[in-house]
Amino acid sequence: MPATALSSDLMVKYEPVIGLEVHVQLLTATKAFCGCANQFGSAPNTNVCPVCLGLPGALPVLNAKAVEYATLASLALNCQVRERSIFARKNYFYPDLPKGYQISQFDKPIAEHGWIDVPTADGTMKRIGITRLHMEEDAGKSLHDGFADSATRTYLDLNRCGTPLAEIVSEPDIRTPDEAFEYLTRLKEILLYTGVSDCNMEEGSLRCDANVSVRPRGQEKFGAKVEVKNVNSFRFIRAALEYEIERQIEVIESGGRIVQETRLWNAGEGRTYSMRSKEQAHDYRYFPEPDLPALIVSPELLAEAKRKLPELPEARRARMIAAYELNEKDAHALTVSREFADRFEAAAKTAKSPRRVANLLLSELGGRLKALGLEQEQSPVSMAGVVMAADLLDENAISSKQLKQLLDICFEKGEDFPAVYEREKPQQISDAGAIEKAIDEVIAANPKQVEQYRAGKKTVAGFFVGQVMKAMKGQANPALLNELVTKKLDA
Ligand code: ADP
Ligand code: ZN
Ligand code: MG
């Protein structure tokens, strides 16, 4: 975890308070209230119809898949799902909102009272409360640049109107920018595992507004909060919070007062700018949506969602740590995505030693991929190839040095392990006489280690095995080598 910039004396005096509002687009095939395609990147204004454009007389019909996804996300975030929730109109004028209101949920959201556990600076876990998860629809997009006449015109693309969203609002439980970063990382991971969103920040399918205030440590009452918008990566959210905390402390220290306002993050300059103050804040005039009945999540629907809920990342890591004797770090690496963890586990099950498969995957392959700047999916060596390599090592059919050489060839030629192994089948010397001769030479050259071994330090045998293997260019039959080394040393 990177150290924060907020290490001044003033951080001893003030405590930040942070709450996050996250919008995620749900991965449904069609929009929330009409049959238009819910698709990123279509030609502008092609996925639209009278319902999502809000033409007179058009009526919304709720997408059942969106409800299923919102319910799944709610359960994954430990929320209580309300059996009866209500849609409301949130009224405001903006060119990318042709209806003049957004269908959202207000006082009766689909889910409340959840939480996510996040790791903190001291290594313990901390529970961050989730106030609510509610369903709503997205607005369109204003295109301010990219056109020849962008200096004088703004264009509208209404394809995004009516895209189903879940808004997830945290309690003001977060205390540092690092905790905010961890919360978002965990939240995204859970949502990805649940499969309800692709959480792609570049495409806007996950967006976050950060609320932050500071108070003198020991004071119970929260300070006035500032909402920071327009932040498009978790790193920038951390940076924006760090900036904003320092700014607020400076204002207070110099005798000023923080006013509740919305500020915009400017990534280029690494600072926030005031956008509107509380006095200019919207009054959304929420009222129940007359065109939609109450949303009922019946006990049957809820039970079905519970059945569909996959094993979540934290639980999966705990199980895999126990099942394959992994450490925490390796468990994280193997569960980066549900798909990767699935592929690993399916393959590992067929191996003699799943733990060795994990080790090879993360060290030998992971190292090579990292050096080349490749992702796991781009590896020339398949999961089955890794299992084969691990089994060969386990059977002592190849030495680890030979394995490294074979993997080098795989990466050089872009070939999978089985093919390279069949072609290159490493020479293995199983001639006991030749191996014994090499052992004798190593024993003669290392009297001190022989003494240690004979004094009871049996692990020194590994040193001899390594030296002989090196002398024999990695070609000695490892099983036979092990056996002969022990025999010679014990003689
Ligand atoms: P608003 O009515 O302005 O939208 P909410 O009470 O709905 O405010 O809270 C929005 C978000 O701001 C939530 O995530 C909440 O945890 C957070 N929040 C509320 N008060 C504060 C505060 N004083 N400092 C920091 N965050 C806060
Ligand atoms: Zn439509
Ligand atoms: Mg709010």
Image (spheres, helix red, strand yellow):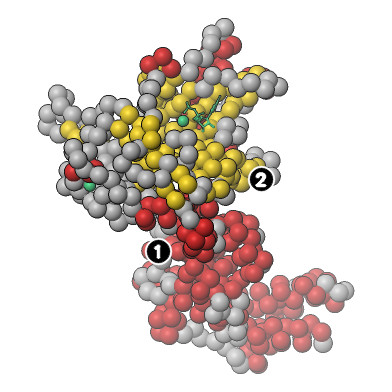
- In the picture, measured across the screen, residue 226 lies left or right of residue 268, that is right
Residue lying farthest to the right in this orientation: 455
Q: Is residue 92 visible?
A: yes
Residue under the image location 33 percent in, 50 percent down: 62
Kind of residue sitting beneath label 2: Met
Assess whether mark 2 and mark 1 are in contact (beta carbons under 8 angstroms). no
Kind of residue sitting beneath label 1: Glu
Q: Position of residue 159 (x, y in %)?
A: 23, 44
Of the 4 image quadrants, the one containing the C terminus is bottom right
Among the two numbered marks 1 and 2 on one chain, the one whose residue lies closer to the N terminus? 2
Q: Position of residue 146 (x, y in %)?
A: 18, 35
Residue under the image location 56 percent in, 48 percent down: 80
Residue under the image location 26 percent in, 31 percent down: 100
Label 1 SS: helix
Please say if 315 is above or below 186. Answer: below
* Quadrant hosting residue 59: top left
Indicate if the residue with disc 1 has its beta carbon within 8 Å of ligand 2.
no
Of 87 and 183, nearer the camera is 87
Q: Which residue is mark 1?
A: 377
Q: Position of residue 272 (x, y in %)?
A: 42, 23
Of 121 and 299, nearer the camera is 299
Label 2 SS: strand
Circle 2 crowding by C-alpha within 10 Å: few under 14, some 14–19, many from 20: few
Q: Which residue is mark 2?
A: 125
- In the picture, measured across the screen, residue 125 lies left or right of residue 447, that is left
